[in-house]
Every structure is written in structure tokens, then in C-alpha cells.
Amino acid sequence: MATISASEGRYRTSKCALVTVGASASFKPLIKEVLSDAFIAKLKSLHFTHFIVQCGPDYDYFESAKPKRNPDDPDDLEIIGFPYKKAFRAWFALATESRPDEPYPRAKGLIITHAGSGSILDALDFNTNIIAVPNPALMGNHQSEIAEEMERQGFLVQGKLGSLVDLLDEETLNIPRKQWPPERDPDSMFPGGLWEVIDMLMPRRRLGDETQGRARWLLF
């Protein structure tokens, strides 16, 4: 596997879409869908130039399914992938619009994340488009409830397996996103904000002699 750095100039230009599935849990159906001919064609039609896929344990599948780049087309979509990287927030930044002091111009792109709370919170730190896709194989599909609530509050768009091609269009990429972090609303059902919502949707559960609380389920 080649070493790839987020500081390399060719990954800091133009328009970037990034997919993240987290470090530990497989989400092969999402990777399969975003590598489909239809999805790749949609990215190209929306003028994306770079497509980065953080694959977790599905890296071998990514390598086998990744479309070949056309060597005769210097403007073809560049697709790269890796299992995980410690300094992953630097890759999230590639999906944001470049600052005036940056040497490489970059348009606002897109982050597609699995709907784990930790990954959603990481993505929300960046001013870009966010689509959260629940992994139905995890934790009784609680990710779907989190994504629905976050979409209802206006922080992101919820995506669903099997319909991402239809969801990804100019309208989705221009939906205004609510400010993060939000101000607390004492009149809300959840005055404590997102953490209170997550605590309600994902109660602590026993795993052997340990309590499964926030620190453990943030890994999903």
C-alpha cells in the first residue's frame, strides 16, 4: 500500500469528496455503492476531482473494486483509499473551501460518513457538506436514529444505502447547514443538545463486567 499524505499538493486542490467508515467496523455496502459506476459518474458530473475513501477493515475490498484511472485523461477523477490514519482530521479539511492564504485553490466538497456519533462530531467541525449514512448492521440501527435527529436539526443530510446516487446533486450540495456547535435551547426537548439526544437513543448497556457508555460506542 502506497504512503499517502494529506499535505501533498495534489490532494489539496480543486474539489474533494471524502468517505469515512470509521476505524473498526466493516461497512462494505457503503464502499461498494460509492465505487459504483453510477456514483463515480455523478461525482464527475458535479466537478469533483479527488475522491478519498477511508475503508477501515474493508481496504482489500476497496483495492479490488476501485475503478481504474484513465491515464490518458489528466482531469479524470483521482480515487485513493486507506484503512485509517491517525491524523485523519487533516483529510476532513480537504473537503472544505480553501482559505485565501492557502497556495492551492479548493472548492467546498463533501464528507460522507457512517452515522457513528464520533465521526459525525468530527465532520461537523468542518464547514462543508455532510451526508451521514447509517450502518444498519450496527447496534440495533441506532445510527439511523442519530442521523434522523441530526438531519431534523439541520446539521447534515441523512443518506440511505441504495439511494446515494439520487441524493447527491447540486441541491444537496447547496443546502444551508446550521451552525455548529448550536446554542443551547432551554425550551427544547433536549436542552443539553446532541449529547442528550445520543444518551437517550443509545443507553448504557452491560458488556460482561463493563458498562458500555459514551467512550465505547464512540468507536462505532
Image: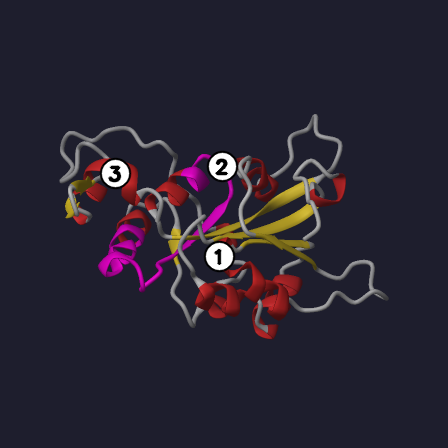
**What amino acid type should be assigned to the residue bearing mark 2?**
Phe
Residue corresponding to mark 1: 57
Tell me the mark number nearer the camera, choosing from 2 and 1: 1
**What amino acid type should be assigned to the residue bearing mark 3?**
Arg
**What amino acid type should be assigned to the residue bearing mark 1?**
Pro
Secondary structure at badge 2 equals: loop
Residue corresponding to mark 3: 214
Q: Does the magenta stretch include residue 28?
A: no
Earlier in the chain: of badge 2 and badge 1, it is: 1
Task: Determine the image quadrant of residue 136.
Answer: bottom left
Q: Is residue 93 above or below residue 208?
A: above
The magenta-colored residue range is 122-147
Tell me the mark number nearer the camera, choosing from 1 and 3: 1
State the image coordinates of residue 84 (x, y, percent, origin top left): 53, 46
State the image coordinates of residue 99 (x, y, percent, origin top left): 64, 30
Q: Which residue lies furthest to the right in this view?
A: 72
Q: How far apart are marks 1 and 3 (CA)?
A: 22 Å
Q: In the rendered view, does 200 fall on the left or right side of 195?
A: left
Q: Residue furthest front?
A: 209
Q: How far apart are marks 2 and 1 (CA)?
A: 25 Å
Q: Which label was assigned to residue 126?
A: 2
